[in-house]
Image (tube, rainbow, N blue to C red):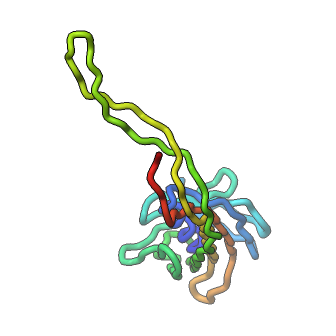
């Protein structure tokens, strides 16, 4: 579950609220859904999504069920690299969570190119009575640029575990990649 939490946080900061992944259940167990009902989850692989509902609450969606996990005061989700360990009492479920987030940025090649651009030009528009007004028009052109397409990779490992023994009951592995265009130079538009 912490892995989901971390991944959800990452996605939230990337303007996303959820992360799709697969939950590997090593044995059967039950979780309390958002309606307070205990739902039995069989051993095996399940498609799952992790949703950040607020900075102090996330949920794991499995099929039609949603399971909420609380984040207590004084605990924060890592934004880049880091770990989070919460007990079952902390999250409000029968199992504690451990999550690890790792982030990497792979620099793309430097690309030099020309891109379309636009700018506003101010001009005077006079009517037949010589009454003039300042107006604006959009002009289009090109500009020289150099940029990199950097690949941002976030990996999350989230374990659902027993508090007393530390036994891992389920594990979520998630990975999110996105490309960010980073300009190194932008010439004037002409």
Which one is nearer the viewer's eye here, 135 or 154? Answer: 135
Q: Is residue 63 left or right of residue 9?
A: right
Number of marks in the rendered image: 0
Q: In this view, does 145 lie to the left or right of 153?
A: left
What residue is shown at x 67% (from left), y 85% (from top)? 167
Which one is nearer the viewer's eye here, 154 or 6? Answer: 154
What residue is shown at x 26% (from left), y 10% (from top)? 128
User: Which of the 4 image quarters holds residue 3?
Assistant: bottom right
Q: Is residue 162 left or right of residue 186?
A: right
- Measuring from the top left, give residue 9's x and y in whole percent: 50, 66
What residue is shown at x 38% (from left), y 38% (from top)? 120
Q: Is residue 158 visible?
A: yes
- Measuring from the top left, give residue 22's x and y in whole percent: 72, 65
Q: Can residue 59 be seen in this view?
A: no
Q: Residue furthest right?
A: 44
What residue is shown at x 50% (from left), y 45% (from top)? 117
Residue 84 vertical position relative to residue 143 in the rendered view, above or below: below
Which one is nearer the viewer's eye here, 108 or 41? Answer: 108
């Amino acid at each position: 579950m912490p892995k989901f939490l971390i991944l959800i946080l990452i996605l939230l900061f990337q303007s996303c609220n959820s992360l799709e992944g697969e939950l590997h259940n090593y044995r059967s167990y039950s979780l309390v859904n958002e309606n307070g009902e205990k739902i039995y989850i069989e051993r095996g692989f399940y498609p799952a999504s992790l949703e950040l509902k607020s900075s102090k609450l996330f949920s794991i969606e499995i099929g039609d069920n949603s399971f909420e996990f609380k984040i207590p005061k004084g605990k924060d989700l890592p934004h880049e690299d880091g770990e989070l360990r919460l007990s079952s009492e902390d999250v409000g479920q029968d199992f504690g969570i451990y999550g690890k987030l790792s982030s990497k940025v792979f620099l793309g090649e430097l690309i030099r190119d020309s891109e379309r651009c636009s700018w506003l030009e101010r001009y005077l528009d006079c009517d037949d009575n010589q009454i003039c007004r300042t107006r604006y028009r959009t002009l289009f052109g090109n500009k020289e640029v150099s940029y990199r397409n950097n690949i941002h990779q976030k990996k999350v490992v989230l374990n659902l575990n027993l508090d007393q023994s530390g036994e891992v009951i389920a594990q979520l592995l998630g990975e999110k990649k996105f490309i960010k265009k980073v300009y190194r130079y932008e010439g004037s538009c002409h």
